[in-house]
């Protein structure tokens, strides 16, 4: 009797997860739920994504990419409880900083978009050597006078001292942002590419341009993958997604390209609310995203 029958045991992406801290990639859950402009259950996302990874193979037949030899240290979840975005800065930084130092790439599963700020702080406490790339329908440049939310992590980082020239934002949608936010981005020197530009030139090509710009100025890069950048019909579990977003295959292609860049040391997936999902479409998209992250990393 064969011992490797795939009808008896199927090696999935979830089987890449290990408790071996020497693995080159780490995975951390940051179940931030509070501080969302649209209240929901983004805090449930890390567990749902890990479960959905069981439905992903480790082999890409199109490129003949095999992830089976790769291992990912699962560092569990940051214990955030009912912490606000401001209160969550320290625990996320404390948990993520040693992971970012010990591993070549750390994947952070949000949680809402407020987790992006502590992720950036964890890479560089001075904020002078780190770059930030966002794939997002929104600028996330809302004012902070009413507190920190998932709508202002980029604004908060600017106020923390991150140079605007160290930020690139791609996939931004019309009628999802204000003129004030756009003016802020221009005045700060942020690299901006609209969803229309990403469709015309290719999201991966735009991402490559943005990465080249950041890599020339920064030692390390954090990438925020806000899933509301994806076309809403393909992303029902993203409360901020809108019609006109990028195609999900373009999202995957850009993810693989981005994660092949050695200066990309951490990535986050944010704004997935499992309570809004339909037929596990968003969960499976998120799990496929993890596979694309790993496929990109393996090309380094």
Image: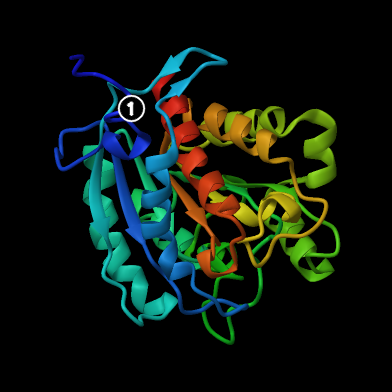
Residue 120 visible somewhere in the drawing: no
Could you classify mark 1 by the number of other residues whose Cα lies within 10 Å: few (under 14), some (14-19), or many (20 or more)?
Answer: few
Question: Which residue is tagged 1?
Answer: 7
Which of the two residues, 52 or 46, is positioned nearer the viewer here?
52
Residue 21 lies left or right of residue 224; in this view the side is left
Q: Decide which of 49, 117 is in the foreground and name it.
A: 49
Q: Quadrant of the C terminus?
A: top left
176 displayed left or right of 67 = right
Work out whether residue 153 can be spotted.
Answer: yes
In the image, what residue occupies the spot 51% across and 38% down?
288
The residue depicted at 73 percent of the width and 40 percent of the height is 247
- Please tell me which residue is depicted at 64% across the width and 38% down the height of the picture: 251
When the figure is inspected, residue 35 is found, relative to residue 266, above or below; the finding is below
Hey, which residue is sitting farthest bottom in the picture? 146
Query: In the picture, residue 210 is in which quadrant?
Result: top right
Along the line of sight, which residue is nearer the eye, 90 or 247?
247
Q: Is residue 221 above or below residue 34?
A: above
Color style of the picture: rainbow
x and y percentages locating residue 172 in the rendered image: 75, 52
Q: Position of residue 55 (x, y in %)?
A: 43, 40
Residue with the most extreme front position: 1
- Look at the numbered disc 1 and give the secondary structure of its residue: loop
Seen in the picture, residue 112 relative to 270 is either above or below; the reply is: below
* Residue found 32% across the figure and 40% down from its top: 14
* Number of numbered markers: 1
Q: Which quarter of the rendering shows the N terminus?
A: top left
Looking at the picture, how far across and down is residue 119, in whole percent?
40, 56
Q: Residue 169 at x, y = what percent? A: 66, 48
Q: Quadrant of residue 298?
A: top left
């Amino acid at each position: 009797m064969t011992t490797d029958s795939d009808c008896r045991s199927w090696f999935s992406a979830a089987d890449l997860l290990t408790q071996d801290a020497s693995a080159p990639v780490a995975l951390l859950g940051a179940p931030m739920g509070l501080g969302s402009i649209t209240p929901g259950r983004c805090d449930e996302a890390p567990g749902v994504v890990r479960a959905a990874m069981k439905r992903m193979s480790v082999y890409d037949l199109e490129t003949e990419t095999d992830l089976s030899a790769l291992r990912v240290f699962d560092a569990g979840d940051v214990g955030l409880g009912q912490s606000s975005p401001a209160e969550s800065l320290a625990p996320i930084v404390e948990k993520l900083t040693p992971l970012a130092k010990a591993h070549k790439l750390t994947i952070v599963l949000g949680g809402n978009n407020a987790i992006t700020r502590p992720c950036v702080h964890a890479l560089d406490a001075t904020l002078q050597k780190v770059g930030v790339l966002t794939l997002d329908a929104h600028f996330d440049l809302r004012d902070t006078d009413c507190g920190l939310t998932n709508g202002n992590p980029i604004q908060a980082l600017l106020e923390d001292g991150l140079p605007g020239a160290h930020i690139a934002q791609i996939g931004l949608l019309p009628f999802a942002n204000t003129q004030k936010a756009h003016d802020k981005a221009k005045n700060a020197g942020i690299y901006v590419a609209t969803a229309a530009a990403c469709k015309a030139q290719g999201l991966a090509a735009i991402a490559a341009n943005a990465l080249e710009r950041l890599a020339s100025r920064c030692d390390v890069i954090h990438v925020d993958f806000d899933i509301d950048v994806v076309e809403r019909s393909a992303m029902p579990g993203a409360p901020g997604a809108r019609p006109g977003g990028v195609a999900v295959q373009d999202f995957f292609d850009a993810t693989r390209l981005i994660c092949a860049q050695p200066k990309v040391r951490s990535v986050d997936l944010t704004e997935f609310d499992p309570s809004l999902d339909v037929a596990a479409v968003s969960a499976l998209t998120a799990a496929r995203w993890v596979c694309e992250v790993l496929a990109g990393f393996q090309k380094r």
